[in-house]
Image (cartoon, rainbow, N blue to C red):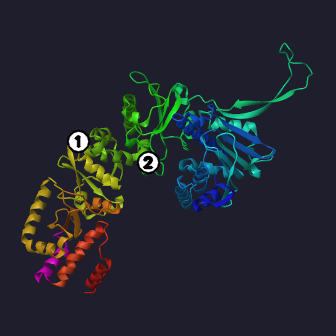
């Protein structure tokens, strides 16, 4: 196929501009990113070759090769991995639609708006745009690649001017070769950093890529004095130059070493290289187990949650090895989905090298390993919660949603999930606006309090202004703040904690058991009886908008509020389902009116003039709409509401 010139995706152009005018001071990381890509390509070939040996083309010696050339000021990184077809080159290098570029750019924009120091931000690794880091040091990048098992090679080239060229070419061996034509600041003796110097590249490989499991090789020129037949140097002889190939990385799997001999920095570098992490992980788990099943695991909780952790395109799972040989990436069957944020690997001699995904699901060994890993992770999180609250809250802010989703999904995964996770949950509460465990909440409950109260809203300020909070605040009762849509689903699944049922402040009666509450309830019942006709007529006027009208016991200063019936979804659940385009789940709305508010007296007076008067109908509608707005629900007809309000204000 002839040579084509194609335009980059718009977002890719923005990304390239960022790279060329790099805000990153640590430009040397480009080499780590390209080596990691090469390692991934070999991984893919190795996995594919387990079922198709012909892909190896007779070459089973995997390697990554670096070729610096001072004369042409280029640096070439080549691998004999899976390679790419023309279509794959366009998809992966031309559009990068799957690489998270948009999220990357949004994060950069946010950092700038907040005046953060973003010179050392860790976004390249976080968003997987590593290939484009090459343009931080190169004025031109050329990629020549041939997919294993095919004959046609492809050449891709760009100077980051908004376009790239692509054409068919010849390539004898499978794999990919990336050649960087270095910018003037990155070659020569006067360069800021010279990436054509062997020692420089050797140090970078040792620093960032020492644990890559494939040999990273490079040619070195050495000078030797000739030796005689006895192997002794010949005195006065002119030195001979020769080229030797050296392997730059140790390749010794970190997880095979004694963890007492491994430095914290080594763990950090391992996860940065192996799993494209950028920051130091929040927590490490290095375990060696012997017994019924033998395995070694090296896991981590990343410092930051990936931007797409809860998206359908996110692939959770751990790497799987057998006797240090890679057999599978993203094994989802080891850990439950609520631990989807975990990264790492498991190496077990009890697993077959060519085990299929179908057999994995039935593997007794794998299930045994998974249960042990899950137990260890949860035990560590529990210890962290007890001994280092600040660090646990940092974990919770990144990954707490996963645990809450885990509890909600326990209806499918088994009720034991609730027992495993309930004591790890944290919720903001009305007590000083701090995070608290359910155990801490229950320990602070007065004896007269029989239920755990909670409120739902988008933020704590909204909850604190809810009229439903008035009575509980007056009595000094603590309320859980559910600020994430998944929170209420989690609480509904739990149902109770330590024998205490959960109760929404916006559902049913509050069931307060103190003497004052009992007296207030009796008083309200008397008022309701005396105003039975008024309450019936309000309900009749509002029709099917509401299920019931009640005289409220929970309101103190507010005129009105909406609550939901004990059965069925709550008002916040209804809104969540509506946002998901699922309007079938409707809350049974109950309008509660404060009998001690001046508006109630006004309504009584208007009602005496007749239930069919337009003024009575307008007041009923305005009270209902006011209750909707308090809950954050827009009225069906805002213009009509505004006109009625203006009409009443004009009186």
The label number, if any, that marks residue 498 in the structure image: 1
Quarter holding residue 535? bottom left
Q: Are marks 2 and 1 in contact (CB under 8 Å)?
A: no
In this rendered view, identify the residue nearer to me: 588 or 335. Answer: 335
User: Is residue 10 toward the left or the right of residue 286 in the image?
Assistant: right
Residue 598 covered by magenta stretch: yes
Residue 513, horizontal then vertical, whole percent? 14, 52
Residue 442 covered by magenta stretch: no
Q: Residue at x 51, y 35 (%)?
A: 51
Between disc 2 and disc 1, the foreground one is 2
In this rendered view, identify the residue nearer to me: 64 or 263. Answer: 64
Quarter holding residue 530? bottom left
* Region in magenta: 594-612
Of the residues under marks 2 and 1, which one precedes in the sequence?
A: 2
Q: Residue at x 61, y 31 (%)?
A: 60
Q: Quadrant of the C terminus?
A: bottom left
User: Is residue 584 toward the left or the right of residue 95 in the image?
Assistant: left
Q: Residue at x 55, y 30 (%)?
A: 254
User: Is residue 262 toward the left or the right of residue 630 in the image?
Assistant: right
SS assignment at label 2: helix
In this rendered view, identify the residue nearer to me: 308 or 267. Answer: 308
Residue lying furthest bottom? 651
The label number, if any, that marks residue 398 in the structure image: 2
Would you say residue 127 is visible in this rendering?
yes
Residue lying furthest right? 236
Would you say residue 22 is visible in this rendering?
no
In this rendered view, identify the residue nearer to me: 142 or 611. Answer: 142
Separation of marks 2 and 1 at Cα, in angstroms: 27 Å
Residue 175, horizontal then vertical, whole percent? 64, 41
The label number, if any, that marks residue 611 in the structure image: none
Quarter holding residue 193? top right
Residue 613, horizontal then vertical, whole percent? 15, 84
């Amino acid at each position: 196929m002839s040579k084509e010139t194609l335009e980059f995706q718009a977002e890719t152009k923005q990304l390239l501009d960022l790279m060329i005018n790099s805000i990153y001071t640590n430009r040397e990381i480009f080499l780590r990113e390209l080596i990691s890509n090469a390692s991934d390509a070999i991984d893919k070939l190795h996995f594919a070759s387990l079922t198709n040996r012909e892909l190896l083309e007779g070459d089973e010696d995997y390697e990554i090769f670096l070729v610096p050339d001072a004369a042409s000021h280029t640096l070439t990184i080549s691998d004999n991995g899976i390679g790419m077809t023309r279509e794959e080159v366009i998809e992966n290098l031309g559009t990068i639609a799957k690489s998270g570029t948009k999220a990357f750019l949004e994060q950069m924009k946010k950092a700038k708006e907040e005046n953060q120091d973003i010179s050392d931000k860790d976004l390249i690794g976080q968003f997987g745009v590593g290939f484009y880091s090459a343009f931080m040091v190169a004025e031109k990048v050329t990629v020549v690649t041939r997919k294993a098992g095919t004959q046609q090679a492809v050449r891709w080239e760009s100077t980051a001017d908004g376009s790239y060229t692509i054409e068919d070419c010849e390539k004898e061996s499978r794999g990919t070769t990336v050649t960087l034509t270095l910018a003037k600041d990155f070659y020569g003796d006067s360069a800021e950093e010279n990436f054509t110097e062997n020692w420089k590249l050797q140090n970078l490989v040792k620093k960032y890529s020492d644990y890559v499991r494939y040999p990273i090789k490079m040619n070195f020129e050495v000078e030797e004095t000739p030796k005689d037949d006895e192997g002794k140097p010949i005195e006065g002889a002119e030195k001979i130059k020769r080229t030797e190939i050296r392997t730059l990385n140790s390749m010794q799997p970190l997880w095979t070493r004694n963890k007492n001999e491994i430095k914290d920095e080594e763990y950090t570098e391992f996860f940065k290289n192996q799993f494209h992490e950028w920051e130091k992980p929040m927590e490490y788990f290095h375990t060696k187990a012997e017994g019924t099943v033998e395995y070694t695991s090296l896991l981590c909780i990343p410092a930051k949650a990936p931007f797409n952790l809860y998206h359908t395109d996110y692939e959770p799972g751990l790497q799987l090895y057998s006797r240090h040989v890679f057999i599978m990436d993203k094994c989802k069957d080891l850990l439950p989905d609520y631990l989807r944020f975990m990264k790492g690997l498991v190496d077990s001699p009890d697993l077959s090298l060519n085990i299929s995904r179908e057999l994995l699901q039935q593997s007794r060994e794998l299930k045994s390993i998974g249960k042990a890993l899950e137990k260890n992770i949860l035990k560590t999180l529990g210890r962290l919660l007890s001994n280092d609250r600040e660090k646990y809250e940092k974990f919770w802010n990144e990954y707490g949603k996963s645990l809450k989703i885990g509890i909600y999904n326990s209806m499918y995964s088994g009720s034991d999930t609730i027992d495993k996770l309930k004591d790890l949950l944290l919720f903001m509460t009305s007590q000083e606006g701090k995070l608290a465990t359910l155990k801490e909440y229950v320990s602070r409950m007065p004896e007269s309090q029989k239920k755990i109260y909670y409120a739902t809203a988008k933020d704590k300020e909204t909850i604190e202004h809810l009229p439903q909070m008035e009575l509980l605040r007056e009595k000094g009762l603590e309320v859980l703040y559910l600020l994430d849509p998944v929170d209420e689903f989690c609480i509904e699944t739990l149902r109770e904690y330590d024998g205490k049922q959960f109760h929404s402040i916006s559902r049913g009666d509050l069931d307060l058991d103190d003497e004052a509450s009992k007296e207030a309830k009796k008083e309200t019942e008397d008022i309701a009886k005396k105003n039975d006709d008024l309450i019936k007529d309000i309900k009749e006027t509002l029709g099917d908008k509401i299920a019931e009208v009640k005289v409220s016991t929970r309101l103190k200063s507010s005129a009105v509020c909406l609550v939901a019936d004990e059965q069925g979804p709550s008002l916040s659940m209804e809104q969540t389902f509506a946002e998901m385009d699922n309007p079938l789940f409707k809350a049974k709305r109950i309008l509660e009116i404060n009998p001690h508010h001046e508006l109630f007296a006004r309504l009584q007076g208007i009602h005496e003039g007749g239930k069919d008067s337009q003024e009575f109908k307008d007041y009923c509608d305005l009270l209902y709409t006011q209750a909707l707005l308090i809950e954050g629900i827009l009225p069906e007809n805002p213009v009509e509401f505004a006109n009625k309000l203006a009409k009443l204000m004009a009186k």
